[in-house]
Amino acid sequence: MDNIDLEVLKTCSQWLASGLRCELVTVLKTWGSSPRPEGSMLAICEDGRVVGSVSGGCIEDDMIDRARREGLNRVQPGIVTYGITADEAHRFGLPCGGTIELAIEPLSPASQLGELLRRLEAGELVARRVDLQTGAVTLSTALPTQSMQVSSSALVTLHGPRWRLLIIGAGQLSRFVAQIAQGMDYAVTVCDPREEYRDSWQVAGVELATGMPDDVVQAMKLDSRCAVIALTHDPKLDDLALMEALRSEAFYVGAIGSRLNNQRRRERLAEHFDLNEEQLGKLHGPIGLYIGSKTPPEIAISILAELTAVKNAVALPQAANVADAKRELGLPPTGEVCIVSG
């Protein structure tokens, strides 16, 4: 599953290959409420087709109408603004007085989309610089800590995964977590030393590691843009890896299992691996948010929803926690529904 930005770039490349004119639109800045964050992209074709989004749909409708009536005649990149006045804000569905600033870039073979896609396919994080005066494009390797930059002379956007996710276990649940996470712009690694599980792994775009999970955790050199999810239910695979992950800078570390199993896991980690209270406090388990999930896809959504809340520093109510929610419902700590991931 491609993330939205990659889908936009691939579609632009296909339109150009078909001899169609198209433009790439990037959100530079917003004031007030906005449905799409800075850096969001949209591509528009001369026949009015669009992919991606820069608003809730109202600005897209205006661009489609203009493309069909006037064609795409822009020669150089430019910056346009929607919603300066209250009337425009109402017309385009923006909050009264709200503003959204967009860069519009006419694309051509010189836009280097083919080279960009090749480097993204190789897993590289790429900075794409567009000269706003000439339209010239240059590509360079970027750092995860970089962010989009815009000035009167140039626009620099980042492309490629800036977040990494390690999934321990190559079972059924892991496949759904990996697929959704790729669409969320994570570079996903699945680790499973068990031949019977890794031989049936079939998720494209995911790196498959066959070593012991704790060795893989160490080799990845986890930083603050990394997350680790243990899904095997096997302490021999999970515990050592969790120990290493909890001692790292990973922003999220979680493990599947019932409340009772997670309590036992915490006791093992404290007793045998000498983790302190602060390190143990980083462990999320039972993993995910309580949404009544039963099937693997629902559980994957629950897990990634919690991971996203932590990533975005959103403080969730205690009732959203699986353990607290089930305790409030009077459910026993054993016999809870869970999907064996491997």
Image: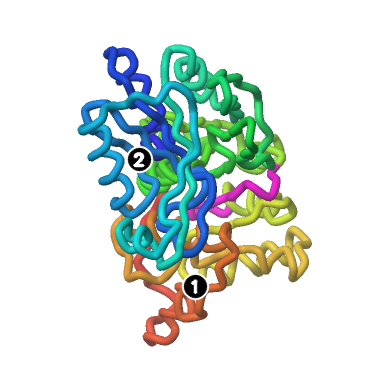
Distance from disc 1 to disc 2, alpha carbons, whole Å, reads 41 Å
Q: Is residue 280 magenta?
A: no
Q: Residue at x 43, y 52 (%)?
A: 36
Residue 42 location in percent, x, y?
Answer: 38, 38
Please state if 246 lies on the left or on the right of 328 as rendered: right
Residue occupied by mark 2: 52
Residue 278 location in percent, x, y?
Answer: 74, 68
Residue occupied by mark 1: 259
Please state if 166 lies on the left or on the right of 290 as rendered: right
Q: Is residue 228 magenta?
A: yes
Please give the range of residues in magenta.
222-236
The local crowd at label 2, few if under 14, some if 14 to 19, many if 20 or more residues have their Cα within 10 Å, is many
Q: Quadrant of residue 165?
A: top right
Q: How many marks?
A: 2
Decide which of tag 1 and tag 2 comes sooner along the chain.
Answer: 2
Residue 65, placed above or below residue 319: above
Q: Nearer the viewer, residue 208 or 139?
A: 139
Residue 231, placed above or below residue 153: below
The local crowd at label 1, few if under 14, some if 14 to 19, many if 20 or more residues have their Cα within 10 Å, is many
Quadrant into which the N terminus falls: top left
Residue 46 location in percent, x, y?
Answer: 26, 26
Q: The residue tagged with tag 1: helix, strand or loop?
A: helix
Asked which colour scheme the image uses, the reply is rainbow
Residue 21 location in percent, x, y?
Answer: 32, 20
Give the residue type at disc 1.
Arg
Give the residue type at disc 2.
Gly
Whether residue 299 is visible: no
